[in-house]
Image (cartoon, rainbow, N blue to C red):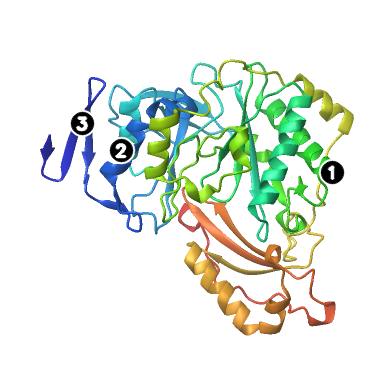
Amino acid sequence: MAAGKETFLDIGGHEVRISSPDKVVFPEAGLTKLDLVEYYLAVAEGALRGAGGRPMVLKRFVKGIAAEPFFQKRVPEGHPDFIDTATFHYASGTSAEEAVIRDAAGLAWIVNLGCLDLNPHPVRAEDLDHPDELRIDLDPMPGVDWSQIVDTAFVARDVLEDHGLVGWPKTSGSRGLHILVRIAPRWTYPELRLAAESLAREVAERAPGLATARWWKEERGESVFVDFNQNAKDRTVASAYSVRSLPDARVSTPLTWEEVRSIRPEEFTVPTVRRRFADQGDAHAGIDEAPGALDGLLALAERLGPAEKPPRGSSATGSGDGRRASVMPLIEIARTKTKPEAEAALDEWRSRHPAVAAQLHPADVLVDGMRGSSSLWYRVRVNLQHIDEEERPPQEPLLSDYDPWASRR
């Protein structure tokens, strides 16, 4: 029933309050908050297969998709009794009592908080020390087209199969692809990350120029980064059927391998995925049936030997603060609170150095979303590797110098 600016839904015997149900969340797509709730209820079986029973970080877009979200680890006080919790211990030594959803009512409750995508950890609430999912994030650098991502995905599938594992592909909901691998919960987080790093190195070895396992962004060129660090204990990724904050309300959508070469990520939006799920069901319906083992990838790690460690000493901008010294000629342009501010700073720098800007390759421009205390901030850098040394502009005062930690000092 409706009650002023709120609606109450009966979902599986639980009453769920939806505040401001008519609030438009995606203006371009014309989708309201209630539309998003109804979408998640329609795909609940698949969404819960990806996120159910796992502690999750709440990524809340309380000011809409045009504003930066904030990240909330701790479950809100006064949460309903159909929301479970689990105390997740982070590598930093901190811990948080995080939300664990187990049914469709939980999905609706999450959406009502302003969450669009679901960000669960790769562990079950019943065993927080032993992950049951390896996550491969194929992250394209600027200038990389979809066909290169697809080719990398099939190389990754071959590496997985060669080591006794089955990968389940899905769109990331942005430009990339994710491959999920269910594993038995017998290995620790460090072992999971080592296995993922070894897989990434093997993919890069089999597909030179196509894929890279280089952790430092300025060294990747126009390639697909096989992001193994998404398997670190503090990381989460958007799970299956998550709605992303792009204007077209794009969805991170499970695929079959037969579909990977024929689809495009922009095909999958809230309306189209809802119809697809009703017609075809969940492409990942069998993902839990045969969990694999990490023995093969860990043996590969031994054969490959230790990964090359980056040099350390001073920062990329020469601040001498003990951080990594880049091997690339980097200059830093700005640090900003929002992405539009970052893009504006980059435009200003381009206008000051038009001849240099014209010679940059797409992957030379580095606009990175950095995790702050509870939200993202943005760092803008330029790699001058393709500029003749005598033409390279020097490091200048930052056009913006936002400090994401100022409020904590």
Where's residue 198, x and y in %?
78, 34
* Viewer-closest of 299 and 152: 152
Residue nearer the viewer, 169 or 301: 169
Task: Please tell me which of labels 2 and 3 falls first in the chain.
Answer: 3
Whichever of labels 3 and 1 marks the residue nearer the N terminus, that label is 3
Name the spot of residue 119 as percent of width and height, x first. 48, 37
- Identify the mark at residue 37; answer none if there is no mark: 2
Mark 1, mark 2: which one is toward the viewer?
Answer: 2
Q: CA distance from mark 2 to mark 3?
A: 10 Å
Q: Amino acid at mark 2?
A: Val
Q: Amino acid at mark 1?
A: Glu
Q: Is residue 342 visible?
A: yes
Q: Which mark is residue 308?
A: 1
The residue that label 3 is drawn on is 9
- Report helix, strand or loop for mark 1: loop
Which residue is painted at 35% across and 58% down in the image? 28
Q: Amino acid at mark 3?
A: Leu
Callout 3: helix, strand or loop? strand
Work out which quarter of the rendered image holds the N terminus and state it. top left
Using residue 19 as the reference point, say whether residue 160 is left or right of it. right
> Do the CB atoms of the residues marked 2 and 3 lie less than 8 Å apart?
yes
Q: Nearer the viewer, residue 143 or 20?
A: 143
Residue at 64% in and 51% down: 146
Up-down: is 368 above or below 172?
Answer: below
